Amino acid sequence: MPTSAPPRNRFERRRAETRQALIRAARQILAETGDTSASIQAIAERADVGFGSFYNHFESKTELFDAAVTDALEEFGQVIDARVEAVDDPAELVAAGFRLTARMADSHPELLRILRDRGLSHIHSDRGLAPRALRDLETGIASGRFTCGNATTALSALGGTLLSLVALRLDRPDLDGDEAASDLAEMVLRMLGLAADDAHEVTRRPLPDLAR
């Protein structure tokens, strides 16, 4: 899971471990049922921490579940980053994001379920997937690779299409996920201004597998 700067002493380490245990428990609940009505006692028990510890870290369940979604999306972004660090073509980065996302239904199903159920409200977040996608869109516009005029508007279209792919991949496991992702990525790249032949070639380039 995503990590911040290492705690400096035993107290800070234990505090960080307790907070992460609560976030991990909330993520499990979101992935399993999507139900945020679980009691604080139930969340604390799942996290194996004391009930009173909850309020040392979060003011409410809403704050905890928001932190859990942000944590999941940040991990999602880091998984993608690790696979595309050598790629500098903005179009290929966009395409790889779609194609790797489809494969994560098998390698990281919990993350995809959270993304499907909670991702819409985080399309323009300053954490997780959104800032990475916005960066790639801005780079593509600045370089002339993309012809759309507004990166933020393009992010709305890209994010909505990605969430549709996630829903399709989870709801229809019988479909060829790689093919569906490549087809949708090709449509998005054409929307961003690539010629048809170029968009098709970019979305069929070799793609690394995701490790668990």
Image: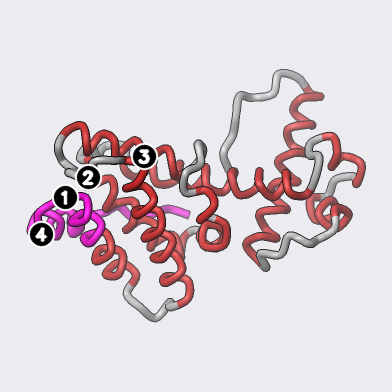
Q: Position of residue 187 (x, y in %)?
A: 23, 62
Residue at which label 1 appears: 193
The mark lying in front, picked from 3 and 2, is 2
Residue 63: image quadrant is: top right
Q: Which residue is painted at 31% across and 42% down in the image?
A: 84
Q: Earlier in the sequence, mark 3 or mark 1?
A: 3
Q: Is residue 126 magenta?
A: no
Amino acid bearing label 1: Gly
Residue 67: image quadrant is: top right
In the foreground, 70 or 137: 137
Point out the stretch of residues depicted in magenta. Answer: 186-212
**How dense is the environment of label 4, judged by Cα within 10 Å: few (below 14), some, or many (20 and up)?**
few
Amino acid bearing label 3: Leu
Marks 2/4: CA–CA distance: 16 Å
| Callout 4: SS | helix
Q: Earlier in the sequence, mark 3 or mark 4?
A: 3
Tags 2 and 1 in contact by the CB under 8 Å rule? yes
Q: Which residue is painted at 32% across and 58% down in the image?
A: 99
The mark lying in front, picked from 2 and 4, is 2
Disc ID at residue 196: 4
In the foreground, 18 or 183: 183
Q: Position of residue 59 (x, y in %)?
A: 81, 39
Residue at which label 3 appears: 134
Residue at which label 2 appears: 148
**How dense is the environment of label 1, judged by Cα within 10 Å: few (below 14), some, or many (20 and up)?**
some
Marks 3/4: CA–CA distance: 23 Å
